[in-house]
Structures are given as C-alpha cells and as structure tokens.
Amino acid sequence: MSPAVGYTAIALVAVVSILIGFYGLRVSRTTSDFYVASRTVRPWWNASAIGGEYLSAASFLGVAGLILLTGTGGLWFPIGYTAGYLMLLLFVAAPLRRSGAYTIPDFTGARLDSLTARRVTSTLVIVVGWFYIVPQLQGAALTVRITTGLPSWVGSVAVAVIVAGVVAAGGMRSITFVQAFQFWLKLTALAVPLVALLIIVNGGAVAPELEPAAAFPAGAGPGALDTYRTISLMVALLLGTLGLPHVLVRFYTNPDGTAARRTTLIVLGLLSVFYLFPTAFGLLGRAFAPDLAVSGEADALILVLPDRLVPGPVGQLLTAFVIAGAFAAFLSTSSGLVVSLAGVISQDLLGGSVRGFRAAALISSLVPLAVALITESTGLAGSVGLVFAFTASTLCPVLLLGIWWRGLTARGAICGMLVGALLSGSAIIAVPAVAAAAPAWSAFVEQPAAWTVPIAAAVTILVSRIDRARVPRGVDAFLARLHVPER
C-alpha cells in the first residue's frame, strides 16, 4: 500500500470535514444553536447525523475484525448495535425529546428534583464519554500506522485536534452538518470497494487462501456460542444504547417527539443497510486474509483487503475509499461524544455559556487523548462492548425508570447508578486477573451486563420503595409532559 494513498485520503476527509464544520459556524449564533441546534433538525438529517456518530471505529473496522476472528459469532455485535435503536424507539426517543432538557443530567435533575442526582449523572456521562472516545483515537492510530507508516500517535492527535476545533467553533449545529456528511461517506466507502471485490472474487481472478470448509467450519455456527456470553453481550448492547450520551443528546435537536420517533425509525433502516458491508468484509477476510487473525491485525482487515485482492491503481483507489471512511468514523463519533460531554461540563461547571462550551470541548478532547496515547487497543469492538456494559449498568436503569415509573426517587437513582458503576467498573478492571487465576469465571467479568444490570435496577427500585415518601411532588406533571403527545 502506497503511503501517498493514505495521506491523500486522510487529508481530504479532514479538510472537507473542517470546511463543512466552519459552514455550520456561520449559522451557529445562539446558545441553543451550540447545545441542541435550536431544536430544528429534521428526521432524515438527524438520522444521518446519528448514523454518522454512532457508527464508530468498532462498527467500521471492529465488526469485520471480529467476524474474521470468530465467524458467525461476531454477528451478534451488529445485531445488538442495531436492535438497541428499536429499544430507543419504543421506550425513550419521544419522551426524552418532550422533557425539554439539554443533556441527560438536565433530565435526571429535573425528573428527580435533585442536584446530587444531577451531579452523579454528570460524572457518569463524562466517564462513559471518555471511555468511548479512547477506542476512536486508538482506531485512528491503527489506521495511520497501517496506511501511512507514520507513528501511531499521529492519528490520535490528528483526530483529537480536528474534533476539538470543529466542536468548539460551531457546536451542535455545526457538527450536525459534518456527521450527516460523514455517514454517507462511510456507507459509500464500504459499499463501493465491497461490490468491486465481490465482482473480482466471483470472476475467479483471485484464489482464496482457505477453502470454504476451512474458512467457515460447520462447528463455528451459532450453536457453538457460549450461552452466557451471548446473552450478556446482547443485554449490554440493547440496554447500553439507551444510555449513550452522544446518541441521546441528538433527540433533543428534533422539533418534537413525533420527529424523534421518526428519526429513530430511519436510523434503524440506515444501520441495517450499513452493517451488511462490514459483515461481508469479515466473511471475505476469513477466506482471503486469514493471516491477519494470526498476526493480531484483525481490525486492519478492511484497510488492507482491497490492495491485497486488487493490486495496482484500482486497488489503491479502493483502499483510498476505505481509509477515507475509516477516518470519517473516528471523526464523527468523537465529535458527537465531545459535543455531549462539552454540554454537560459547560452546564454543570462553566456556567452554560458559549465560551464555557468551547472550553469544555477542549477538555473533553484532551483527557481521552492522554489515555489513548499511554494505552494500547485490545480489539475495537470488544473495547466498545465494555463501554456498553458500563452504560447499561449505570445510566440505562435510571433513564427507563425515570420515564416509566413514578416511584423513582433521587436516593434510589443515586444508589442504583453507584452500585452499577462499582460492579461493572470492577468487573472490567478485574478481567486480566480473573482470566489468569480462574479461567472458568472469566466470562462473568468479560461480559458482566447479565448480572450487573439486574442488580443495579433492583437496588434502584428497592431504595426508591424504601424512600417512597421522597417521591418528587411534581412527578405527575413531569410524566404527563413526557407521555402526552404534542398538538
């Protein structure tokens, strides 16, 4: 692969993203523009932007890498990522938009009438956001190293700087334009090379390195999957989506609850189409690039497969497509996360002004950059899966109960969030030690959502029942606003 291809593709995506972002700056004037794009984003535009920020490094590179490594077992990730939006459609999208909040902490603070609950929620949102940004920066590091030969840190720094600049300059309205463009770029960047590769492979121009029986053994089907790990992963992905701050904040940008539901329905369709392509790349990789699984470079499959199967100028062009799409994935997801974190930090610590938002955007970018520079990726999809488990155990129970159960109290919510954070965080940290000392128990810490989510929800309900005298007085009026459709 020629380094010039990597330089050109990355530079073009960066320049176009910056130009679109600064176009958004021209129409970002008010505080509401910076936080929720003045709540004027229409369903198709918002759905494209959600697709842009949700389809992260784990989706663009990690899903194909997982299928290369595990075969059909890796299909649970795209299934869970997509099905999480069905949960959003059914339980969260419209009520959350009707709440009138700017951020998740705004919602919990208003619903529970508690400054402490708001602060705990803010802390967890910041932790979740930082955890989620780190894999994006690590994916950028991998892409730059593989495609240009530059040191890995260059990719992480480049993404952090571009994102911080664009978000600080134009806020939510600016990022909406950028993310919508980046979704369609990512979809095209996978679809065009994949169709070309399938035509070439079906024409017999390239011989597979593994025969179908070896690449797709019968014993590697769904029946061979570990039941507990599969159930726990699906709990994490289905419920974790409900608490992702960069996803939820986008519903505040819709004009009303009906538009929020329509947005979610469109997102389901867009995600269903998108995940066909990394899945097909992973299946091609099992037959034509099995060595990447052995070398530990499975996440690089999409980046190297076009040039390997189609040497010459055509292969270089296809490679440029996927490099551009990968870099767009890192930029768009990181941008959405930084916007959501900047809103929380600015509202809670910096007065909620435009200047505070810009300072918070810089802080939100620099902290995960420091973490990414001193750590190494252990698999993009797996890293993001742990973030989903943490989110499902902390923010999800409070969000669902806050919308659908009038008996939730501030103490119940705080206890549930803290217990969920303690259990899921401890499990994530303990993975290496448990895997070494007690391999039979490793599944319970590698995929903790199946037990951490029920415990966190049970604690939330139990403490709220004990503390039922402290149910906020205005809860009935608040819930009526969430559930009564707008005229």
Image: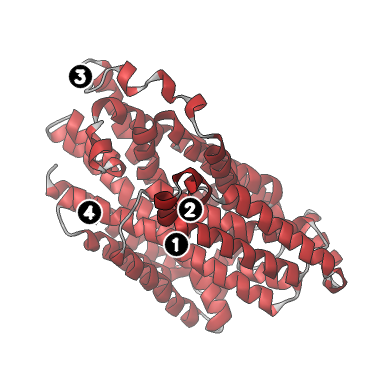
The answer to the question of whether label 2 and label 1 lie on touching residues, with beta carbons closer than 8 A, is: yes
Q: Residue at x 68, y 64 (%)?
A: 416
User: Is 75 in front, or is 248?
Assistant: 75
For disc 3, the marked residue is 207
Q: Residue at x 27, y 27 (%)?
A: 197
The x, y position of residue 468, in whole percent, is: 85, 68
The amino acid type found where label 3 is placed reads Ala
Q: Does label 2 or label 3 sit earlier along the sequence?
A: 3
Of the residues under marks 4 and 3, which one precedes in the sequence? Answer: 4
Residue 256 in view in this figure: no
Q: Front-most of 272 and 119?
A: 119
Residue placed under numbered mark 2 in the picture? 386
What residue is shown with label 1? Answer: 131
> Nearer the N terminus, badge 2 or badge 1?
1
Circle 4: residue type: Val
Question: Dot 4 lies on which element?
Answer: helix
- The image position of residue 190, as x and y in percent, is 34, 37
Image quadrant holding the N terminus, namely top left
Q: Is residue 376 above or below residue 79?
A: below
- Tell which tag, 1 or 4, sits nearer the viewer: 1
Query: The residue under label 1 is which amino acid type?
Result: Phe
Residue drawn at x 36%, y 22% is 216
Query: Position of 254 compared to 407: left or right?
Result: left
Q: Which mark sits nearer the N-terminus, 4 or 2?
A: 4
Quarter the C terminus occupies: bottom right
The residue that label 4 is drawn on is 144
**Residue nearest the viewer, comparing 195 with 288:** 288
Q: Callout 1: helix, strand or loop?
A: helix
Give the CA separation, mark 2 to mark 1.
Answer: 9 Å
Within-10-Å neighbours for mark 2: few <14, some 14–19, many 20+ = many
The residues bearing labels 1 and 4 have C-alpha atoms spaced at a distance of 21 Å
